[in-house]
Image: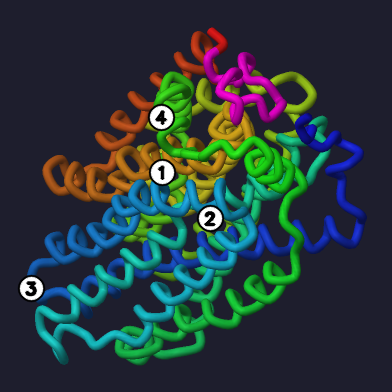
Amino acid sequence: MSTPVPTDQDVAPTPKARRRLFASTMIGNAVEYYDFTLYGTLAAVIASHFFPEGQTTVALLAAYVGVALSYFIRPIGAMILGPLADLKGRRPVLVLTIVLMTVGTAGIGLLPTYAAAGVVAPILLLTARVVQGLGASVEITTAANFLLEHENKRRRNYVLGTLNSTASVGSFLAAGVAFLFTQLMSSEAFASWGWRIPFLLAIPLSAVAVYIRNRLNESPEFEAVRQLADQRKVPQTPLRTAVRYYWPDMLRSIGLSAGQRIGSFVIQAYFVTALVGAGFPTSLALLASMISYAVGPVPSIYGGYLADKYGARVPLLIGYGLFVVLTVPTFIAIGSKSILIAVLAVVGFTIINNIISAPMMAAAILSFPSEVRSSASALNFNVSTSLIGSTAGLVAVWLRDITGSDVTFGWYMTGFCVLSLLITIFALPTGARRDASTGLLAETAVRTP
Protein backbone atom coordinates (compact mmCIF):
# COMPACT_ATOMS: atom_id res chain seq x y z
CA MET A 1 0.00 0.00 0.00
CA SER A 2 1.44 3.35 -1.02
CA THR A 3 0.86 6.87 0.16
CA PRO A 4 -0.76 9.02 -2.51
CA VAL A 5 0.52 12.43 -3.44
CA PRO A 6 -1.70 15.08 -1.86
CA THR A 7 -4.48 16.51 -3.99
CA ASP A 8 -4.86 20.23 -4.63
CA GLN A 9 -7.27 20.44 -1.70
CA ASP A 10 -4.77 18.70 0.59
CA VAL A 11 -1.90 20.88 -0.58
CA ALA A 12 -3.60 24.28 -0.58
CA PRO A 13 -2.45 26.20 2.53
CA THR A 14 -4.59 28.42 4.70
CA PRO A 15 -4.53 32.17 3.92
CA LYS A 16 -2.19 32.80 6.87
CA ALA A 17 0.15 29.98 5.84
CA ARG A 18 0.07 31.21 2.24
CA ARG A 19 1.16 34.67 3.35
CA ARG A 20 4.10 33.17 5.24
CA LEU A 21 5.02 31.01 2.25
CA PHE A 22 5.01 33.91 -0.16
CA ALA A 23 6.84 36.19 2.25
CA SER A 24 9.60 33.67 2.98
CA THR A 25 10.29 32.69 -0.61
CA MET A 26 10.00 36.17 -2.03
CA ILE A 27 12.20 37.86 0.54
CA GLY A 28 14.87 35.23 -0.13
CA ASN A 29 14.65 35.75 -3.88
CA ALA A 30 14.78 39.50 -3.41
CA VAL A 31 17.91 39.12 -1.27
CA GLU A 32 19.58 37.00 -3.97
CA TYR A 33 18.99 39.62 -6.64
CA TYR A 34 19.85 42.46 -4.27
CA ASP A 35 23.22 40.80 -3.72
CA PHE A 36 23.85 40.12 -7.38
CA THR A 37 22.65 43.47 -8.73
CA LEU A 38 24.57 45.39 -6.10
CA TYR A 39 27.83 43.77 -7.17
CA GLY A 40 27.11 44.40 -10.85
CA THR A 41 25.96 47.96 -10.23
CA LEU A 42 29.09 48.81 -8.25
CA ALA A 43 31.44 46.80 -10.47
CA ALA A 44 33.41 49.89 -11.49
CA VAL A 45 33.89 50.93 -7.84
CA ILE A 46 34.84 47.40 -6.83
CA ALA A 47 37.34 47.21 -9.69
CA SER A 48 39.07 50.35 -8.43
CA HIS A 49 39.42 49.00 -4.88
CA PHE A 50 40.30 45.34 -5.32
CA PHE A 51 42.50 45.31 -8.41
CA PRO A 52 45.64 47.21 -9.46
CA GLU A 53 45.20 50.77 -10.76
CA GLY A 54 46.04 52.01 -14.23
CA GLN A 55 44.29 49.38 -16.39
CA THR A 56 40.59 50.21 -16.34
CA THR A 57 39.42 47.57 -18.81
CA VAL A 58 41.49 44.83 -17.17
CA ALA A 59 40.21 45.79 -13.71
CA LEU A 60 36.61 45.87 -14.93
CA LEU A 61 37.04 42.49 -16.60
CA ALA A 62 38.48 41.15 -13.33
CA ALA A 63 35.47 42.51 -11.45
CA TYR A 64 33.16 40.70 -13.87
CA VAL A 65 35.19 37.55 -13.30
CA GLY A 66 33.78 37.84 -9.77
CA VAL A 67 30.29 37.83 -11.29
CA ALA A 68 31.08 34.83 -13.46
CA LEU A 69 32.89 32.92 -10.69
CA SER A 70 29.92 33.13 -8.35
CA TYR A 71 27.91 31.50 -11.13
CA PHE A 72 30.48 28.96 -12.29
CA ILE A 73 30.32 27.53 -8.77
CA ARG A 74 26.54 27.21 -8.96
CA PRO A 75 26.37 23.90 -10.85
CA ILE A 76 28.55 22.42 -8.10
CA GLY A 77 26.25 23.90 -5.49
CA ALA A 78 23.29 22.51 -7.43
CA MET A 79 24.77 19.01 -7.39
CA ILE A 80 25.20 19.24 -3.60
CA LEU A 81 22.21 21.24 -2.38
CA GLY A 82 19.67 20.14 -5.02
CA PRO A 83 19.79 16.47 -3.95
CA LEU A 84 19.84 17.61 -0.32
CA ALA A 85 16.49 19.34 -0.89
CA ASP A 86 15.12 16.14 -2.44
CA LEU A 87 16.39 13.98 0.41
CA LYS A 88 16.12 16.15 3.53
CA GLY A 89 13.49 18.71 2.57
CA ARG A 90 13.00 22.07 0.89
CA ARG A 91 12.75 24.12 4.09
CA PRO A 92 16.17 23.41 5.67
CA VAL A 93 17.88 24.05 2.33
CA LEU A 94 16.04 27.36 2.00
CA VAL A 95 17.39 28.42 5.40
CA LEU A 96 20.92 27.35 4.45
CA THR A 97 20.86 29.22 1.15
CA ILE A 98 19.95 32.55 2.72
CA VAL A 99 22.71 32.20 5.35
CA LEU A 100 25.37 31.45 2.73
CA MET A 101 24.27 34.34 0.51
CA THR A 102 24.41 36.75 3.44
CA VAL A 103 27.88 35.64 4.53
CA GLY A 104 29.19 36.15 0.99
CA THR A 105 27.55 39.52 0.41
CA ALA A 106 28.15 41.12 3.79
CA GLY A 107 31.71 39.81 3.67
CA ILE A 108 32.44 42.01 0.65
CA GLY A 109 31.53 45.05 2.73
CA LEU A 110 34.18 44.10 5.29
CA LEU A 111 37.10 43.15 3.05
CA PRO A 112 40.42 45.03 2.87
CA THR A 113 41.23 46.76 -0.43
CA TYR A 114 44.12 46.04 -2.80
CA ALA A 115 45.96 49.07 -1.42
CA ALA A 116 45.77 47.60 2.10
CA ALA A 117 46.25 43.88 1.49
CA GLY A 118 47.71 43.53 -2.00
CA VAL A 119 46.89 40.37 -3.90
CA VAL A 120 45.05 38.96 -0.86
CA ALA A 121 42.22 41.46 -1.47
CA PRO A 122 41.02 40.09 -4.84
CA ILE A 123 41.42 36.53 -3.54
CA LEU A 124 39.15 37.32 -0.60
CA LEU A 125 36.71 39.09 -2.90
CA LEU A 126 36.44 36.10 -5.21
CA THR A 127 36.11 33.78 -2.20
CA ALA A 128 33.17 35.83 -0.95
CA ARG A 129 31.61 35.56 -4.40
CA VAL A 130 32.03 31.78 -4.33
CA VAL A 131 30.23 31.54 -0.96
CA GLN A 132 27.45 33.78 -2.25
CA GLY A 133 27.19 31.66 -5.40
CA LEU A 134 26.92 28.43 -3.42
CA GLY A 135 24.04 29.85 -1.43
CA ALA A 136 22.26 31.23 -4.48
CA SER A 137 22.76 28.03 -6.50
CA VAL A 138 19.43 26.52 -5.46
CA GLU A 139 17.66 29.52 -3.93
CA ILE A 140 15.22 30.29 -6.74
CA THR A 141 14.56 26.70 -7.83
CA THR A 142 14.05 25.41 -4.28
CA ALA A 143 11.85 28.38 -3.41
CA ALA A 144 9.80 27.76 -6.55
CA ASN A 145 9.50 24.05 -5.72
CA PHE A 146 8.40 24.91 -2.20
CA LEU A 147 5.70 27.28 -3.43
CA LEU A 148 4.45 25.00 -6.21
CA GLU A 149 4.17 22.03 -3.90
CA HIS A 150 1.82 24.03 -1.68
CA GLU A 151 -0.21 25.76 -4.37
CA ASN A 152 -3.10 25.00 -6.71
CA LYS A 153 -1.98 23.60 -10.07
CA ARG A 154 -4.27 25.96 -12.00
CA ARG A 155 -2.22 29.04 -11.09
CA ARG A 156 1.30 27.72 -11.07
CA ASN A 157 2.67 30.08 -13.73
CA TYR A 158 1.06 33.01 -11.94
CA VAL A 159 2.75 31.92 -8.71
CA LEU A 160 6.09 31.66 -10.49
CA GLY A 161 5.57 35.04 -12.14
CA THR A 162 4.93 36.57 -8.73
CA LEU A 163 8.03 34.90 -7.32
CA ASN A 164 10.13 36.06 -10.26
CA SER A 165 8.82 39.59 -9.83
CA THR A 166 10.78 39.84 -6.59
CA ALA A 167 13.97 39.66 -8.65
CA SER A 168 13.05 43.14 -9.89
CA VAL A 169 12.25 44.18 -6.32
CA GLY A 170 15.65 43.03 -5.08
CA SER A 171 17.39 44.68 -8.01
CA PHE A 172 15.41 47.88 -7.44
CA LEU A 173 16.48 47.92 -3.80
CA ALA A 174 20.12 47.43 -4.78
CA ALA A 175 20.12 50.16 -7.41
CA GLY A 176 18.03 52.41 -5.18
CA VAL A 177 20.33 52.03 -2.19
CA ALA A 178 23.40 52.65 -4.37
CA PHE A 179 21.73 55.70 -5.95
CA LEU A 180 20.66 57.04 -2.55
CA PHE A 181 24.16 56.88 -1.12
CA THR A 182 25.66 58.51 -4.21
CA GLN A 183 23.26 61.42 -3.58
CA LEU A 184 23.67 61.64 0.20
CA MET A 185 27.45 61.33 0.22
CA SER A 186 30.19 63.14 -1.63
CA SER A 187 31.60 61.18 -4.55
CA GLU A 188 34.93 60.93 -2.69
CA ALA A 189 33.33 59.53 0.48
CA PHE A 190 31.21 57.03 -1.43
CA ALA A 191 34.17 55.85 -3.49
CA SER A 192 36.33 55.61 -0.37
CA TRP A 193 34.07 53.78 2.11
CA GLY A 194 30.39 54.50 1.48
CA TRP A 195 30.11 51.73 -1.12
CA ARG A 196 30.48 49.19 1.73
CA ILE A 197 27.20 50.14 3.43
CA PRO A 198 24.85 48.66 0.78
CA PHE A 199 26.62 45.29 1.08
CA LEU A 200 26.24 45.29 4.87
CA LEU A 201 22.52 46.04 4.56
CA ALA A 202 22.06 42.46 3.31
CA ILE A 203 22.31 41.33 6.95
CA PRO A 204 18.98 42.73 8.23
CA LEU A 205 17.19 41.77 5.00
CA SER A 206 18.38 38.18 5.33
CA ALA A 207 17.60 37.99 9.05
CA VAL A 208 13.92 38.55 8.29
CA ALA A 209 13.92 35.76 5.69
CA VAL A 210 15.68 33.30 8.02
CA TYR A 211 13.19 34.02 10.81
CA ILE A 212 10.17 33.40 8.58
CA ARG A 213 11.61 30.31 6.91
CA ASN A 214 12.35 28.67 10.24
CA ARG A 215 8.64 28.89 11.07
CA LEU A 216 7.36 27.16 7.92
CA ASN A 217 6.13 23.59 7.52
CA GLU A 218 7.68 21.28 4.95
CA SER A 219 5.70 20.84 1.73
CA PRO A 220 3.05 18.07 1.88
CA GLU A 221 4.23 16.67 -1.46
CA PHE A 222 7.77 16.19 -0.19
CA GLU A 223 6.51 14.59 3.02
CA ALA A 224 4.43 12.12 0.99
CA VAL A 225 7.46 11.17 -1.12
CA ARG A 226 9.67 10.71 1.94
CA GLN A 227 7.03 8.56 3.67
CA LEU A 228 6.63 6.36 0.59
CA ALA A 229 10.38 5.98 0.24
CA ASP A 230 10.60 4.87 3.86
CA GLN A 231 7.75 2.40 3.41
CA ARG A 232 9.26 0.81 0.33
CA LYS A 233 12.80 1.08 1.65
CA VAL A 234 13.91 2.37 -1.74
CA PRO A 235 17.32 4.10 -1.71
CA GLN A 236 16.94 7.57 -3.23
CA THR A 237 19.58 8.87 -5.63
CA PRO A 238 17.84 11.95 -7.04
CA LEU A 239 20.77 13.48 -8.94
CA ARG A 240 21.81 10.24 -10.63
CA THR A 241 18.21 9.38 -11.46
CA ALA A 242 17.53 12.86 -12.88
CA VAL A 243 20.58 12.81 -15.15
CA ARG A 244 20.01 9.20 -16.23
CA TYR A 245 16.32 9.42 -17.11
CA TYR A 246 15.54 13.09 -17.66
CA TRP A 247 18.55 14.49 -19.50
CA PRO A 248 16.57 15.27 -22.72
CA ASP A 249 14.20 17.61 -20.85
CA MET A 250 17.15 19.06 -18.95
CA LEU A 251 18.92 19.94 -22.20
CA ARG A 252 15.75 21.45 -23.64
CA SER A 253 15.28 23.53 -20.49
CA ILE A 254 18.84 24.83 -20.76
CA GLY A 255 18.32 25.92 -24.36
CA LEU A 256 14.90 27.40 -23.62
CA SER A 257 16.25 29.62 -20.84
CA ALA A 258 19.44 30.72 -22.66
CA GLY A 259 18.14 33.98 -24.10
CA GLN A 260 16.34 35.00 -20.92
CA ARG A 261 19.36 34.21 -18.76
CA ILE A 262 21.55 36.53 -20.84
CA GLY A 263 18.82 39.17 -20.71
CA SER A 264 18.64 38.98 -16.92
CA PHE A 265 22.39 39.43 -16.58
CA VAL A 266 22.35 42.39 -18.95
CA ILE A 267 19.61 44.06 -16.90
CA GLN A 268 21.13 43.41 -13.49
CA ALA A 269 24.84 43.63 -14.17
CA TYR A 270 25.66 45.35 -17.45
CA PHE A 271 23.19 48.09 -18.35
CA VAL A 272 24.70 50.53 -15.84
CA THR A 273 28.18 49.84 -17.25
CA ALA A 274 26.90 50.23 -20.82
CA LEU A 275 25.15 53.52 -20.04
CA VAL A 276 28.22 54.94 -18.27
CA GLY A 277 30.38 53.74 -21.18
CA ALA A 278 28.04 55.56 -23.56
CA GLY A 279 28.79 58.83 -21.74
CA PHE A 280 25.87 59.13 -19.30
CA PRO A 281 26.58 60.12 -15.66
CA THR A 282 26.56 57.27 -13.14
CA SER A 283 23.57 58.81 -11.33
CA LEU A 284 21.48 58.79 -14.54
CA ALA A 285 22.60 55.24 -15.33
CA LEU A 286 21.48 54.10 -11.86
CA LEU A 287 18.20 55.99 -12.26
CA ALA A 288 17.55 54.24 -15.59
CA SER A 289 18.13 50.88 -13.92
CA MET A 290 15.81 51.79 -11.06
CA ILE A 291 13.03 52.66 -13.51
CA SER A 292 13.42 49.33 -15.30
CA TYR A 293 13.34 47.45 -11.98
CA ALA A 294 10.26 49.40 -10.86
CA VAL A 295 8.25 48.31 -13.91
CA GLY A 296 9.69 44.77 -13.91
CA PRO A 297 7.22 43.00 -11.55
CA VAL A 298 4.15 43.73 -13.70
CA PRO A 299 5.28 41.93 -16.90
CA SER A 300 6.66 39.07 -14.83
CA ILE A 301 3.26 38.44 -13.22
CA TYR A 302 1.43 39.07 -16.51
CA GLY A 303 3.63 36.54 -18.30
CA GLY A 304 2.58 33.96 -15.71
CA TYR A 305 -1.07 34.90 -16.19
CA LEU A 306 -0.76 34.47 -19.98
CA ALA A 307 0.93 31.08 -19.56
CA ASP A 308 -1.82 29.81 -17.25
CA LYS A 309 -4.60 31.04 -19.53
CA TYR A 310 -3.22 30.31 -23.02
CA GLY A 311 -0.32 27.93 -22.44
CA ALA A 312 3.41 28.46 -21.99
CA ARG A 313 4.17 28.94 -25.69
CA VAL A 314 2.23 32.22 -25.96
CA PRO A 315 4.40 34.41 -23.66
CA LEU A 316 7.54 32.57 -24.77
CA LEU A 317 6.81 33.23 -28.45
CA ILE A 318 5.96 36.87 -27.73
CA GLY A 319 9.04 37.44 -25.60
CA TYR A 320 11.65 35.68 -27.69
CA GLY A 321 10.15 36.96 -30.94
CA LEU A 322 10.49 40.54 -29.67
CA PHE A 323 14.01 39.88 -28.41
CA VAL A 324 15.12 38.63 -31.83
CA VAL A 325 13.81 41.83 -33.41
CA LEU A 326 14.67 44.40 -30.74
CA THR A 327 17.86 43.35 -28.91
CA VAL A 328 20.26 45.02 -31.37
CA PRO A 329 18.15 48.21 -31.55
CA THR A 330 18.23 48.34 -27.74
CA PHE A 331 22.02 48.66 -27.74
CA ILE A 332 21.91 51.12 -30.62
CA ALA A 333 19.53 53.22 -28.52
CA ILE A 334 21.89 53.13 -25.53
CA GLY A 335 24.60 54.65 -27.71
CA SER A 336 22.27 57.34 -29.09
CA LYS A 337 23.39 59.95 -26.51
CA SER A 338 19.73 60.58 -25.64
CA ILE A 339 18.93 59.56 -22.08
CA LEU A 340 15.20 59.40 -22.89
CA ILE A 341 15.72 56.98 -25.78
CA ALA A 342 18.19 54.94 -23.72
CA VAL A 343 15.80 54.66 -20.76
CA LEU A 344 12.89 53.64 -23.00
CA ALA A 345 15.09 50.96 -24.58
CA VAL A 346 16.22 49.60 -21.20
CA VAL A 347 12.65 49.54 -19.85
CA GLY A 348 11.32 47.83 -23.00
CA PHE A 349 14.09 45.25 -22.80
CA THR A 350 13.19 44.54 -19.17
CA ILE A 351 9.49 44.10 -19.97
CA ILE A 352 10.27 41.57 -22.70
CA ASN A 353 12.67 39.64 -20.48
CA ASN A 354 10.24 39.42 -17.58
CA ILE A 355 7.31 38.23 -19.68
CA ILE A 356 9.38 35.12 -20.44
CA SER A 357 10.43 34.40 -16.87
CA ALA A 358 7.43 32.48 -15.46
CA PRO A 359 6.88 29.92 -18.28
CA MET A 360 10.64 29.48 -18.63
CA MET A 361 10.93 28.68 -14.92
CA ALA A 362 7.90 26.38 -15.08
CA ALA A 363 9.56 24.36 -17.83
CA ALA A 364 12.77 24.13 -15.80
CA ILE A 365 10.91 22.79 -12.75
CA LEU A 366 7.62 21.14 -13.65
CA SER A 367 9.10 18.87 -16.30
CA PHE A 368 10.30 16.63 -13.46
CA PRO A 369 8.52 14.61 -10.73
CA SER A 370 8.84 15.73 -7.13
CA GLU A 371 11.34 12.99 -6.19
CA VAL A 372 14.04 14.50 -8.40
CA ARG A 373 12.62 17.97 -9.00
CA SER A 374 15.09 19.95 -6.90
CA SER A 375 18.09 18.05 -8.30
CA ALA A 376 16.98 18.28 -11.94
CA SER A 377 15.76 21.89 -11.89
CA ALA A 378 18.75 23.18 -9.91
CA LEU A 379 21.21 21.55 -12.29
CA ASN A 380 19.60 22.56 -15.60
CA PHE A 381 18.85 26.10 -14.39
CA ASN A 382 22.35 26.65 -13.04
CA VAL A 383 24.11 25.21 -16.07
CA SER A 384 22.19 27.68 -18.23
CA THR A 385 22.78 30.50 -15.78
CA SER A 386 26.49 29.78 -15.33
CA LEU A 387 27.69 28.84 -18.80
CA ILE A 388 25.46 31.18 -20.82
CA GLY A 389 24.10 33.90 -18.58
CA SER A 390 26.93 34.71 -16.20
CA THR A 391 29.49 35.13 -18.96
CA ALA A 392 27.40 37.88 -20.58
CA GLY A 393 29.23 40.67 -18.74
CA LEU A 394 32.65 39.31 -19.73
CA VAL A 395 31.61 38.89 -23.35
CA ALA A 396 30.04 42.37 -23.43
CA VAL A 397 33.14 44.08 -21.99
CA TRP A 398 35.44 42.12 -24.32
CA LEU A 399 33.39 42.86 -27.44
CA ARG A 400 33.11 46.53 -26.51
CA ASP A 401 36.87 46.73 -26.03
CA ILE A 402 37.65 45.30 -29.48
CA THR A 403 34.79 46.94 -31.43
CA GLY A 404 34.16 50.15 -29.46
CA SER A 405 30.43 49.42 -29.39
CA ASP A 406 27.88 47.34 -27.49
CA VAL A 407 25.93 46.56 -30.68
CA THR A 408 28.09 43.50 -31.39
CA PHE A 409 27.05 42.06 -28.06
CA GLY A 410 23.44 42.68 -29.09
CA TRP A 411 23.96 40.32 -32.03
CA TYR A 412 25.54 37.79 -29.67
CA MET A 413 22.44 37.77 -27.47
CA THR A 414 20.14 37.66 -30.49
CA GLY A 415 21.74 34.39 -31.58
CA PHE A 416 20.85 32.74 -28.28
CA CYS A 417 17.32 34.15 -28.44
CA VAL A 418 16.89 32.49 -31.83
CA LEU A 419 17.91 29.17 -30.23
CA SER A 420 15.39 29.65 -27.40
CA LEU A 421 12.69 30.60 -29.90
CA LEU A 422 13.28 27.43 -31.92
CA ILE A 423 13.04 25.29 -28.79
CA THR A 424 9.81 27.08 -27.87
CA ILE A 425 8.34 26.18 -31.27
CA PHE A 426 9.65 22.66 -31.76
CA ALA A 427 10.86 21.16 -28.46
CA LEU A 428 9.23 22.88 -25.50
CA PRO A 429 9.83 20.77 -22.34
CA THR A 430 6.44 20.21 -20.74
CA GLY A 431 6.85 17.09 -18.67
CA ALA A 432 3.86 15.62 -20.49
CA ARG A 433 5.26 12.10 -20.10
CA ARG A 434 5.68 12.48 -16.34
CA ASP A 435 3.47 10.64 -13.92
CA ALA A 436 2.20 12.96 -11.20
CA SER A 437 2.35 10.11 -8.70
CA THR A 438 5.39 8.94 -6.83
CA GLY A 439 5.87 6.01 -9.20
CA LEU A 440 9.47 6.98 -9.71
CA LEU A 441 10.31 5.45 -6.35
CA ALA A 442 9.14 2.10 -7.71
CA GLU A 443 11.35 2.71 -10.76
CA THR A 444 8.43 2.49 -13.15
CA ALA A 445 7.44 5.97 -14.24
CA VAL A 446 10.91 6.89 -15.41
CA ARG A 447 11.03 3.89 -17.69
CA THR A 448 7.89 4.89 -19.56
CA PRO A 449 8.89 5.91 -23.10
Give the image quarter of residue 40.
bottom left
* Helix, strand or loop: magenta stretch: loop
Q: Amino acid at mark 1?
A: Asn
Left/right of residue 411 with respect to residue 178 in the rendered view:
left
Q: Secondary structure at mark 3?
A: loop
Question: How far apart are the two marked residues, 3 and 4, measured between alpha carbons?
Answer: 47 Å
Question: Sequence-wise, which precedes: disc 3 or disc 4?
Answer: 3
Reply above or below: 51 against 60. below
Question: How far apart are the two marked residues, 1 and 3, measured between alpha carbons?
Answer: 35 Å
Q: Which mark is residue 243?
A: 4
Q: Which residue is mark 3?
A: 54
| Front label number (2 vs 3) | 2
Q: Which mark is residue 390?
A: none
Q: Amino acid at mark 2?
A: Glu
Question: How far apart are the two marked residues, 2 and 4, measured between alpha carbons?
Answer: 20 Å
| Position in image of residue 147 (x %, y %) | 71, 48
| Residue at the outermost left position | 54
Q: Secondary structure at mark 2?
A: helix
Q: How would you rate the neighbour count of disc 2 (Cα within 10 Å): few for under 14, some for 14-19, many for 20 or more?
A: many
| Position in image of residue 166 (x %, y %) | 64, 56
Instruction: Answer whether residue 249 is visible to the viewer in this image.
Output: yes
Q: Which residue is mark 1?
A: 382
Q: Amino acid at mark 4?
A: Val
The stretch in magenta equals 430-447
